[in-house]
Image (spheres, rainbow, N blue to C red):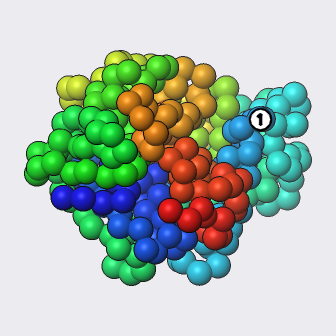
Amino acid sequence: MQADLVVVGAGIVGATLVARVRQCLPGLSLMLVDDGQRASASALSAGLVTPFCGAGSRRRRSELAFAHYQALSQRWPGVAKVAFSFVASEGQRPLLFDAKPLEGRLAALMHQYRGASAKPALFQAGHAFVIDVPGLVSAYLAPGEGRLTRLAARVERLDGDGPAWCLQTSAGAVTARRVIFASGARSNALLRAIPGSLIKKIVAFDLQAAQLPDPTQGVIYMPARKAFVMPNQRRDGWLLSITSADWRAVADGRVDALPDEAREAQRILEQELPGLPIRSLRPRAAFDSYCADGEPRVVCLPGGPGACALVGASGSGVRFAPALANEALVAVGLLADASAPGFINHCKET
């Protein structure tokens, strides 16, 4: 089996890469290799893309993603625009696109949910996007432009072979001029030479209650807790996402929410949002790749030019997928400009 480019991983970052290549380089033979594991970060993603973006490369990547999803919302129904409110101090306001004190009907509603925990201040920072991540992956990978072949297989080894690369997979050998790994936590086990890559469990809870907030009221983000509450777009009700302390070197073993994580979720709700009448929490969990500093990286692989890995996409990667796809294609010599917004033809000839 042969291809000009092999993308490993059919999550949101891999699918975004495929969509980018199919549109700007339709003559390229492209193979997408994925092992089909269902409990992936993309399959379980909350799909939240927030304007809380920090500085430097994080801000640049966030701005590109916002422009991409803003344009996508005009032609695809799986992007919802929701109000974005957050619990913070005055000192955090410069980190946001457009932060202002919460007021009006939304302020009254959020203060009701927060009860006596109305301090520190509630701010509003424009809007967030909520993406139907599995739906977007399916849309990006649907039959259409370009020369796309899909291979359901597990990649077991990668070898440099002169001007090409050879991937040994459970379905046989694949040779390619260029290879991009976008398989999240599973890349860490395969490419142990990648520096600075770690595995962290991501944990969320579907909130069960007799009466939940109006889903049109948006997202409540709690930076100090590293948690957020948001409408659950694929189910009725709301979802709480928390930060797990479960870090490891490889994504081995079961990936379940622990009792301590469920208790922490309950504490956050009781202390930050006591006005939410929650009856029970239904957990979901997945492993994903993170970097120690929280910033995703595009790492060129040793053994020759034309191969890279996306490391530390921080959850499903939906927040950074448009930027990371551009950066990966620049790294393997297929894109000229990593800052190009959306799917615009800024591609090199091959």
Among all residues in the image, which is located at the extreme left?
Answer: 171
**Horizontal and vertical percent position of residue 207:** 43, 47
> Which residue does the image show at 69% across and 62% down from the upper left?
341
Of residue 130 and residue 105, the one placed in the foreground of this image is 130
Q: Is residue 331 visible?
A: yes
- 69 left or right of 240? right
Q: Nearer the viewer, residue 295 or 304?
A: 304
**Could you tell me which residue is drawn at 19 percent across and 36 percent down?**
156
Q: Position of residue 315 (x, y in %)?
A: 47, 40
Instruction: Specify the quadrant that holds the N terminus.
Output: bottom left
Q: Is residue 266 visible?
A: no
- The relative height of residue 2 versus residue 70 in the rendered view (above or below) is above
Q: Looking at the picture, which amino acid does disc 1 mark?
A: Gly
Image check: 192 left or right of 79?
left
For residue 144, what is the image quadrant?
A: bottom left
Which quadrant would residue 204 be assigned to in this image?
top left
Examine the rendered structure and indicate whether residue 251 appears above or below residue 211: above
> Is residue 155 left or right of 115 when viewed as pictured?
left
Q: Position of residue 131 (x, y in %)?
A: 53, 61
Q: Outermost residue, front direction?
A: 162
Disc 1 on helix, strand or loop?
helix
Q: Is residue 114 left or right of residue 280?
A: right
| Residue 115 image point, x, y percent | 69, 38
Quarter of the view holding residue 202: top left
Q: Which residue is at a point 38% across and 21% down the rendered structure image?
A: 193
Residue bearing the label numbered 1? 56
Task: Identify the residue at image location x=41%, y=54%.
Answer: 14
